[in-house]
Amino acid sequence: MFNIVLLEPRIPGNVGTIGRLAFALNCTLHLIKPYGFGEITEKEVRRAGLDYWFDLDVKEYNNIEEFWAKNPLNARHFFATTKTTQNYFDVKYEVGDYFYFGREDAGLPESLLAQHTQGCITIPMTNNARSLNIANSVSIVAYEALRQNFSQFNA
Protein backbone atom coordinates (compact mmCIF):
# COMPACT_ATOMS: atom_id res chain seq x y z
CA MET A 1 0.00 0.00 0.00
CA PHE A 2 2.42 2.70 1.27
CA ASN A 3 6.05 2.81 2.36
CA ILE A 4 7.04 3.97 5.83
CA VAL A 5 10.68 4.99 6.06
CA LEU A 6 12.38 5.38 9.45
CA LEU A 7 15.77 7.06 9.21
CA GLU A 8 18.04 6.07 12.09
CA PRO A 9 15.33 5.28 14.66
CA ARG A 10 16.48 5.49 18.28
CA ILE A 11 13.76 3.78 20.36
CA PRO A 12 12.96 0.09 19.80
CA GLY A 13 9.44 0.37 21.23
CA ASN A 14 8.57 3.03 18.65
CA VAL A 15 9.88 0.81 15.85
CA GLY A 16 7.77 -2.09 17.11
CA THR A 17 4.65 0.08 17.38
CA ILE A 18 5.18 1.46 13.88
CA GLY A 19 5.76 -2.08 12.60
CA ARG A 20 2.41 -3.13 14.04
CA LEU A 21 0.74 -0.18 12.28
CA ALA A 22 2.54 -1.00 9.02
CA PHE A 23 1.26 -4.56 9.23
CA ALA A 24 -2.31 -3.37 9.90
CA LEU A 25 -2.21 -1.13 6.81
CA ASN A 26 -0.27 -3.56 4.60
CA CYS A 27 2.61 -1.07 4.32
CA THR A 28 6.26 -1.84 3.84
CA LEU A 29 8.46 -0.67 6.70
CA HIS A 30 11.92 0.50 5.62
CA LEU A 31 14.50 0.83 8.42
CA ILE A 32 17.69 2.76 7.74
CA LYS A 33 20.69 2.28 10.02
CA PRO A 34 22.36 3.14 12.27
CA TYR A 35 19.79 2.42 14.97
CA GLY A 36 19.92 3.90 18.43
CA PHE A 37 19.72 0.39 19.83
CA GLY A 38 21.20 -3.01 18.99
CA GLU A 39 19.61 -5.21 16.41
CA ILE A 40 16.03 -5.08 15.17
CA THR A 41 15.45 -8.46 16.77
CA GLU A 42 15.59 -6.98 20.28
CA LYS A 43 12.78 -8.00 22.59
CA GLU A 44 11.54 -4.40 22.94
CA VAL A 45 10.83 -4.26 19.20
CA ARG A 46 9.09 -7.62 19.22
CA ARG A 47 7.07 -6.75 22.33
CA ALA A 48 5.64 -3.57 20.81
CA GLY A 49 5.11 -5.26 17.43
CA LEU A 50 3.45 -8.27 19.08
CA ASP A 51 3.03 -11.33 16.93
CA TYR A 52 2.61 -9.18 13.81
CA TRP A 53 6.34 -8.52 13.54
CA PHE A 54 7.15 -11.80 11.80
CA ASP A 55 4.51 -11.24 9.12
CA LEU A 56 5.51 -7.63 8.49
CA ASP A 57 7.11 -6.59 5.20
CA VAL A 58 10.22 -4.98 6.71
CA LYS A 59 13.44 -4.11 4.92
CA GLU A 60 16.71 -2.92 6.44
CA TYR A 61 19.40 -0.74 4.85
CA ASN A 62 22.88 0.21 6.02
CA ASN A 63 22.42 3.86 4.98
CA ILE A 64 20.16 6.18 3.01
CA GLU A 65 22.23 5.81 -0.16
CA GLU A 66 21.57 2.07 -0.18
CA PHE A 67 17.86 2.78 0.37
CA TRP A 68 17.76 5.23 -2.55
CA ALA A 69 19.62 2.81 -4.81
CA LYS A 70 16.71 0.40 -4.32
CA ASN A 71 13.94 3.02 -4.00
CA PRO A 72 14.86 5.94 -6.29
CA LEU A 73 13.81 9.40 -5.22
CA ASN A 74 10.91 10.99 -7.05
CA ALA A 75 7.98 13.31 -6.32
CA ARG A 76 6.17 10.54 -4.37
CA HIS A 77 8.59 10.75 -1.41
CA PHE A 78 7.33 12.85 1.53
CA PHE A 79 9.39 14.06 4.46
CA ALA A 80 7.70 14.65 7.82
CA THR A 81 9.12 17.65 9.65
CA THR A 82 8.17 20.54 11.88
CA LYS A 83 10.25 22.79 9.60
CA THR A 84 7.72 23.41 6.83
CA THR A 85 4.31 25.00 6.41
CA GLN A 86 2.80 22.41 4.03
CA ASN A 87 0.24 20.47 6.08
CA TYR A 88 0.13 16.72 5.57
CA PHE A 89 -3.62 16.85 4.83
CA ASP A 90 -3.12 19.29 1.92
CA VAL A 91 -1.21 16.72 -0.14
CA LYS A 92 -2.86 14.20 -2.48
CA TYR A 93 -1.32 10.82 -1.71
CA GLU A 94 -1.12 7.82 -4.01
CA VAL A 95 -0.70 4.14 -3.34
CA GLY A 96 3.01 3.38 -3.20
CA ASP A 97 4.06 6.73 -1.70
CA TYR A 98 7.01 6.93 0.69
CA PHE A 99 6.70 8.66 4.07
CA TYR A 100 9.98 9.51 5.83
CA PHE A 101 10.35 10.05 9.56
CA GLY A 102 13.59 10.95 11.30
CA ARG A 103 15.28 10.22 14.57
CA GLU A 104 13.17 10.77 17.66
CA ASP A 105 15.77 13.14 19.10
CA ALA A 106 16.59 15.16 15.97
CA GLY A 107 14.10 14.55 13.14
CA LEU A 108 15.25 14.34 9.57
CA PRO A 109 18.56 15.99 8.65
CA GLU A 110 18.26 19.65 7.61
CA SER A 111 20.29 18.93 4.47
CA LEU A 112 17.79 16.30 3.36
CA LEU A 113 14.85 18.62 3.97
CA ALA A 114 16.54 21.48 2.10
CA GLN A 115 17.02 19.27 -0.97
CA HIS A 116 13.37 18.15 -0.98
CA THR A 117 11.33 21.16 0.13
CA GLN A 118 8.41 20.32 -2.17
CA GLY A 119 7.98 16.96 -0.44
CA CYS A 120 8.14 18.28 3.13
CA ILE A 121 4.96 17.87 5.17
CA THR A 122 4.04 18.81 8.72
CA ILE A 123 1.42 17.88 11.26
CA PRO A 124 0.06 21.16 12.62
CA MET A 125 -0.10 21.70 16.37
CA THR A 126 -2.09 24.42 18.09
CA ASN A 127 0.29 25.13 20.96
CA ASN A 128 4.03 25.26 21.58
CA ALA A 129 4.73 21.52 21.56
CA ARG A 130 8.08 20.79 19.92
CA SER A 131 6.81 17.66 18.15
CA LEU A 132 4.70 14.54 18.45
CA ASN A 133 5.84 11.01 19.21
CA ILE A 134 7.10 9.38 16.02
CA ALA A 135 4.64 6.47 16.23
CA ASN A 136 1.76 8.95 16.52
CA SER A 137 3.10 10.95 13.59
CA VAL A 138 3.40 7.88 11.38
CA SER A 139 -0.18 6.91 12.29
CA ILE A 140 -1.56 10.34 11.43
CA VAL A 141 0.10 10.53 8.01
CA ALA A 142 -0.49 6.87 7.06
CA TYR A 143 -4.17 7.00 7.93
CA GLU A 144 -4.66 10.21 5.95
CA ALA A 145 -3.11 8.47 2.96
CA LEU A 146 -5.41 5.49 3.55
CA ARG A 147 -8.45 7.78 3.88
CA GLN A 148 -7.66 9.38 0.53
CA ASN A 149 -7.23 6.03 -1.20
CA PHE A 150 -9.65 3.86 0.77
CA SER A 151 -12.01 3.19 -2.13
CA GLN A 152 -9.22 1.26 -3.89
CA PHE A 153 -9.04 -1.17 -0.99
CA ASN A 154 -12.70 -1.37 -0.05
CA ALA A 155 -14.11 -2.22 -3.47
Image (cartoon, grey):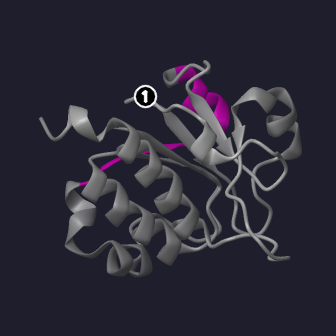
Which quadrant does the N terminus fall into?
Answer: top left
Q: Could you say which is closer to the camera, residue 121 or residue 28?
A: 121
Residue 58 at x, y = what percent? 36, 48
**Residue at horizontal 71%, vertical 51%?**
122
Residue 18 at x, y = what percent? 44, 63
**Residue at horizontal 28%, vertical 56%?**
23
Q: Magenta region: which residues?
A: 56-69
Q: Residue furthest left?
A: 155
**Residue at horizontal 44%, vertical 40%?**
3
Left/right placement of residue 4 relative to residue 28 reads right
> Would you place residue 73 above or below residue 41 in this image?
above
Left/right placement of residue 91 relative to residue 103 reads left
Residue 137 at x, y = what percent? 58, 62
Residue at the spot of label 1? 94
> Would you place residue 60 above or below residue 97 in this image?
below
Identified by mark 1, the residue type is: Glu
